């Protein structure tokens, strides 16, 4: 598991009149979702679309509001995701990190764009077997 701090820009793609919010985020490769505090969801006027059951680090399971869509930007990367309303800080999980092709450098505790793909996000859409 890797933890690092980073900055993100978050905005609501459904409300053009709102300015993006720059946030400090804890990037956690052991978490799945983007988690945001309620005050961020309120500032971005995000609407609850459903609920998700989340298991927290202490092993507790709780049902949390799920909001979206939310536009996430990191450097030259971006993605659209839903977010779980949970906690008092922004947590960037593996799903949006994979979508933006970001990696955590544990020794420096920082997040960077994948150095193998510095100009754009890349990923596997379908496993392909090569002919031998």
Image (cartoon, grey):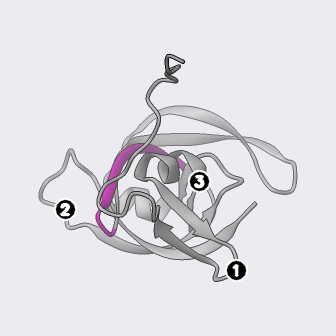
10 Å crowding of disc 3: few (<14), some (14-19), many (20+): many
Indicate whether 79 appears above or below 11.
Answer: above
Left or right: 94, with 48 as reference point: right
Range shown magenta: 75-85
- Measure the C-alpha gap from mark 2 to mark 3: 24 Å
Quadrant of the rendering where the C terminus is positioned: top right
- Measure the C-alpha gap from mark 1 to mark 2: 37 Å
Left or right: 73, with 15 as reference point: right
Left or right: 37, with 41 as reference point: right
Q: Which mark is residue 107?
A: 1
Left or right: 32, with 59 as reference point: left
- Measure the C-alpha gap from mark 3 to mark 1: 19 Å
Quadrant of the rendering where the N terminus is positioned: bottom right
Indicate whether 130 appears above or below 24.
Answer: above
Is there CB contact under 8 Å for labels 1 and 2?
no
Q: Which mark is residue 32?
A: none
The mark closer to the camera, 2 or 3, is: 3
Could you say where residue 58 lies in the image, as x and y percent from the top left? Answer: 87, 56
Residue in the foreground of this view, choosing between 52 and 77: 77
Q: Earlier in the sequence, mark 3 or mark 1?
A: 3
> Which residue lies under the disc numbered 2?
18
10 Å crowding of disc 2: few (<14), some (14-19), many (20+): few
Residue 124 is at least partly visible in this image:
yes
Q: Give residue 55's quadrant in the image.
A: top right
10 Å crowding of disc 1: few (<14), some (14-19), many (20+): few
Q: Report the residue at 48% width, 49% height from top.
A: 96
> Which residue lies under the disc numbered 3?
93
């Amino acid at each position: 598991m890797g933890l690092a701090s980073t900055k993100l820009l978050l905005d609501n793609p459904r409300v053009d009149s709102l300015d993006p919010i720059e946030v400090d985020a804890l990037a956690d490769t052991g978490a799945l979702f983007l988690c945001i505090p309620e005050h961020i969801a309120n500032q971005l006027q995000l609407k609850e679309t459903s609920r998700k059951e989340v298991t927290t680090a202490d092993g507790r399971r709780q049902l949390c509001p799920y909001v979206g869509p939310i536009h996430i930007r990191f450097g030259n990367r971006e993605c659209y995701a839903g977010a779980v309303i949970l906690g008092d800080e922004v947590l960037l999980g593996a799903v949006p990190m994979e979508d933006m092709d970001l990696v955590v450098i544990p020794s420096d505790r920082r997040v960077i764009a994948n150095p193998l793909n510095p100009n754009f996000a890349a990923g596997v859409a379908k496993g392909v077997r090569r002919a031998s």
